Amino acid sequence: MAIKVYVPRDSSALSLGADRTAKAIQAEAAKRGIEIELIRNGSRGLFWLEPFVEVATDKGRVAFAPVQPKDVASLFDADFLNNGAHALNLGLTEELAWLKKQQRLTFARVGITDPVSLEDYLAHDGYKGLKNALNMTGAEIVKSVTDSGLRGRGGAAFPTGIKWNTVLGCQVEQKYIVCNADEGDSGTYSDRMIMENDPFVLIEGMTIAGVAVGANMGYIYLRSEYPHALKVLNEAIAKAEAAGYLGDKICGSSHTFNLEVRRAAGAYICGEETSLLESLEGKRGQVRFKPPLPAIEGLFGKPTVVNNVISLATIPIILDKGAQYYADYGMGRSRGTLPIQLAGNIKHGGLVELAFGATLRELLYDFGGGSFTGKPIRAVQVGGPLGAFLPESQFDTPLDYEEFSKIWAVLGHGGIVAFDDTVDMAKMARYAFEFCAIESCGKCTPCRIGSTRGVEVIDRIIANKNALDTNGVKEHAKQVQLVRDLSDTMINGSLCALGGMTPYPVLSAMNHFGEDFGLENR
């Protein structure tokens, strides 16, 4: 019987040579007359160890990593197919501390299954949630989602059940389900990993949403820079349709749900839900005024559920295991788990799924292993380019929406970007304004003009921060106050979160790292 060998097909693994490693293993096995079954699974999320090769054994999968083509011959010499001793042998995958300490619910299958194998998905509890949902009323499904405590994982953290209930209550024939897969935040990749490595869970989640609120059409608005996800999603959708999990009379029921993937416009602003809907309608991606809310007048003016990938991909486990099962994880009003993405100057970058309540320090050091350079971690930015910069004194803050709000920070999409003590925080503040200036849709003045003026003022602060004469000190103080006044205008006057949250990284950098702005002796 052929021995199963797993090599990831995730784009991060591919960028680190997974295809070359897979071909080398196949070639070496053929050369030695050894029969193997090569399976291209998803990534386990330990990106510093990619390509991450696994071999199926009677005791479980054994990991070998990182495996480059030059390592393959020596692995065969060491009889790695039978758990032979080798420098790259990490032991049983499930016993690796980095994975064992996690609480994987949304990512339960990621890295384990073949992403485009429907049989594999079904063998690992796939479509159990949908089958339960088909025996429930829409109101019962929405109540289950509400009771689970699931909140939006796209950044705003709005309760998913409330949004669904609003759409459910609209008495119209046409409704839509839209998945916001335009993942553009710096240091984030959990959406991509779901779409590339477990696409059926997203398809199932969107189908359940359609059944719940009475929508028969769904769209995945996919980031244009994700070609691998596009291919995987379309292949998975075709298989789901062929097997009766999409289309007319889903699983023999009276429900209809169709699904399409649409490529995004390549603009950060289209991650904002109303701008996304404008783009999906074929218009320029500009923010809409609210109200009306998309749940009442959304895509093509019809009631629309707009949720992030992770929110929708979490629905199947809630409908399978029950609302209470999911709600038992987490703390306070932050229920369930959050896929956290470690990036930046970090030794062990990758995806960690944990219940809300873990601290930044635990993530940065217990999972991340500290900085890649070995220097002290000076700051982390949580929640993408609009997230606040947090100093070491705040690393013990638990990951919880309300706890982060208390320190004027956001969890956002769960991306954590680390910086060591060589970072210049004045330059990071400047970049925040610059990013906003580039990505603004231009519809509102505070965002469009404020971000451009912000870059100019930060440049003057940097130029004057070492001025020792009285006039220099006075001018410096004037510019610092101007940034604060400008930030206040953007926070309170911008039409959407792009302009309204750009001051978060700017002001947090000034407040916590004043020495980089020449504020220590002013």
Image (tube, rainbow, N blue to C red):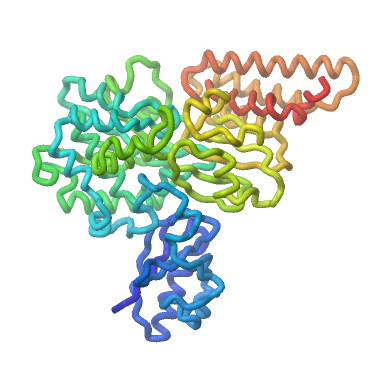
Quarter holding the N terminus is bottom left
Q: Give the quadrant of the C terminus.
A: top right
Residue 503, horizontal then vertical, whole percent? 59, 23
What residue is at 28 percent from the left and 20 percent from the top? 297
Between residues 493 and 252, which one lies in front from this camera angle? Answer: 252
| For residue 431, above or below residue 84 | above
* Residue at screen point 57% across, 53% down: 348
Going by the image, does 88 lie left or right of 277? right
Image height of 254 relative to 195, above or below: above
Q: Quarter of the image holding residue 504?
A: top right
Q: Residue 289, position in %: x, y? A: 40, 16
Q: Identify the residue shown where x is 56% and y is 73%.
A: 87
Quadrant for residue 40, please give it.
bottom left
* Residue 405 at least partly seen: yes
Q: Position of residue 331 (x, y in %)?
A: 43, 32
Residue at 58% of width from left, 32% of height from top? 435
